[in-house]
Image: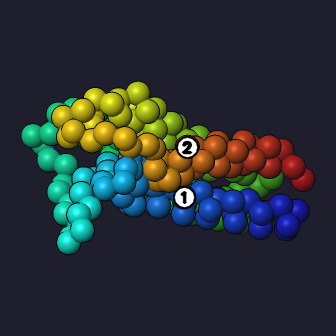
């Protein structure tokens, strides 16, 4: 049982790391001379890397803010889920454990799903006014989808682990 708990903790910490990288790093949409994320747009020239923040005057700013908020909320929930797991491990009796951790992880999973789905469906609208052609989804976007799968699997593991003796 100790090995299972150790695996779940490592899996949970991996989920947190993926969420931090996907939220912070500037690689949701990349091209040969530019990179975009949910926070800023960077144009790479031969002399410098010019980055501008995504401001309120940007088209579809409300959708971008929704993506930002749900990714931040997902990261916070995932961190809180790990703390909750540690408290539940020592405080609750068997059969009652890990339900709250599983629910928190499921909410984190839902937030990542919302953010990645909005970006997937609206990425052409985001980039149209910036005149960015020839781009593709970057590794931060892919890490967001992987974090979705990890948080979902982690929430399922918590709910299954609840029943183990």
Looking at the image, residue 95 sits to the left or right of residue 102; the answer is right
Q: Secondary structure at mark 1?
A: helix
Viewer can see residue 73: no
Q: Is residue 41 above or below residue 130?
A: below
Looking at the image, residue 143 sits to the left or right of residue 86; the answer is left
Looking at the image, residue 141 sits to the left or right of residue 46; the answer is right
- Residue at 77%, 63% in the rendered image: 7
Q: Nearer the viewer, residue 80 or 121?
A: 121
Question: x and y percent of residue 163 in the render?
Answer: 83, 44
Residue 132: name its quadrant.
top left
Q: Nearer the viewer, residue 79 or 44?
A: 44
Q: CA distance from mark 2 to mark 1?
A: 10 Å
Q: Which numbered disc flags the more N-terminal residue, 2 or 1?
A: 1
**Residue furthest bottom as drawn:** 47
Viewer can see residue 22: yes
Which residue matches tag 2?
145
Which residue matches tag 1?
18
Question: Would you say the residues marked 2 and 1 are in contact, meaning their CB atoms lie under 8 Å apart?
Answer: no
């Amino acid at each position: 049982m100790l090995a299972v708990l150790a695996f779940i903790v490592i899996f949970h910490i991996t989920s947190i790391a993926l969420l931090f990288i996907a939220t912070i790093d500037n690689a949701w949409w990349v091209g040969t001379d530019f990179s975009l994320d949910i926070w800023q747009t960077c144009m790479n020239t031969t002399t410098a890397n010019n980055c501008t923040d995504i401001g309120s005057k940007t088209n579809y700013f409300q959708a971008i803010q929704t993506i930002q908020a749900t990714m931040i909320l997902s990261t916070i929930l995932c961190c809180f889920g790990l703390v909750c797991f540690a408290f539940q491990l020592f405080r609750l009796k068997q059969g009652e454990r890990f339900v709250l951790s599983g629910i928190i992880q499921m909410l984190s999973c839902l937030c990542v799903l919302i953010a990645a789905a909005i970006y997937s469906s609206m990425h052409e609208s985001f980039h149209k006014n910036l005149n960015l052609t020839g781009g593709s989804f970057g590794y931060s976007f892919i890490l967001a989808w992987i974090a979705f799968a990890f948080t979902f699997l982690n929430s399922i593991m918590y709910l299954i682990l609840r029943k183990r003796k």
